[in-house]
Image: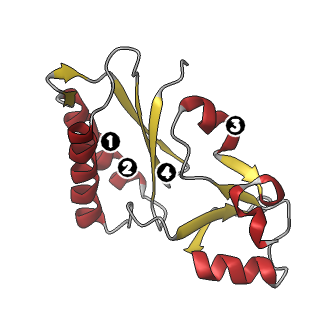
Amino acid sequence: MNNNKLWVFQSKRTITVKEEEEILEKIHYFLKSWAAHGAELKSEINILDHKFLIISVDEAQTKASGCSIDSLNQCIREIDAQYHLELLNRLWISYKENNKDIETIALKDFKEKVKAGLLSPDTWVYNLSVSSSEEFNEKFKQPLYKSWAKIYL
């Protein structure tokens, strides 16, 4: 995979299989006509772990513009309104301990858990700010002690 531009949207809750099918259909429909200044954007959608919507664009072909990004956010807002996933709320933090399910909690609660020693330095933490496929591969899921959240240890 080349170094595509990425947007990661996190659901506060687990997305059901039926919802995933519907969401994928809606986003595929949107992506078919997604363009920047009239030029088609070569893009794709993946849903990871029934939690993360990952939209990627091959910017070697066409770069996403401000207007095209706004239209993507509008599409996500519409999906959010229908399914109540809180996809645009960046104050939710997802983490995973050992073989447990991914948990998503408010940032303030996450900080409190870390400070109270309820999360180990090896707890997996997800980074929604990754913006390229390269960053995704390196920094999307990291142990707490290496992640953006290590400042809370």
The residue that appears at 55% across and 31% down in the rendered structure is 133
* Mark 1 / mark 4, whichever is N-terminal: 1
What is the number of the mark on residue 93?
none
Label 3, label 4: how many angstroms apart (C-alpha)?
A: 16 Å
In the displayed structure image, the side of residue 12 where residue 113 appears, left or right: right
Amino acid at pointer 3: Glu
Q: Give the x, y percent position of residue 27.
A: 27, 41
Label 1, label 4: how many angstroms apart (C-alpha)?
A: 12 Å
**Disc 2 + disc 3, Cβ < 8 Å:** no
* Mark 1 / mark 3, whichever is N-terminal: 1
**How many residues crowd around disc 4 within 10 Å: few (fewer than 14), some, or many (20 or more)?**
many
Amino acid at pointer 4: Phe
Find disc 4 in the rendering and name its residue. 52
- Observer-nearest of 25 and 59: 59
Amino acid at pointer 1: Leu
Q: Give the x, y percent position of residue 82.
A: 23, 64
Q: Nearer the viewer, mark 2 or mark 3?
A: 3
**Disc 1 + disc 3, Cβ < 8 Å:** no
In the displayed structure image, the side of residue 111 where residue 56 appears, left or right: left
Label 1, label 2: how many angstroms apart (C-alpha)?
A: 6 Å
What is the number of the mark on residue 138?
3
Find disc 1 in the rendering and name its residue. 24
Quadrant including the C terminus: bottom right
Residue 128 shows in this picture? yes
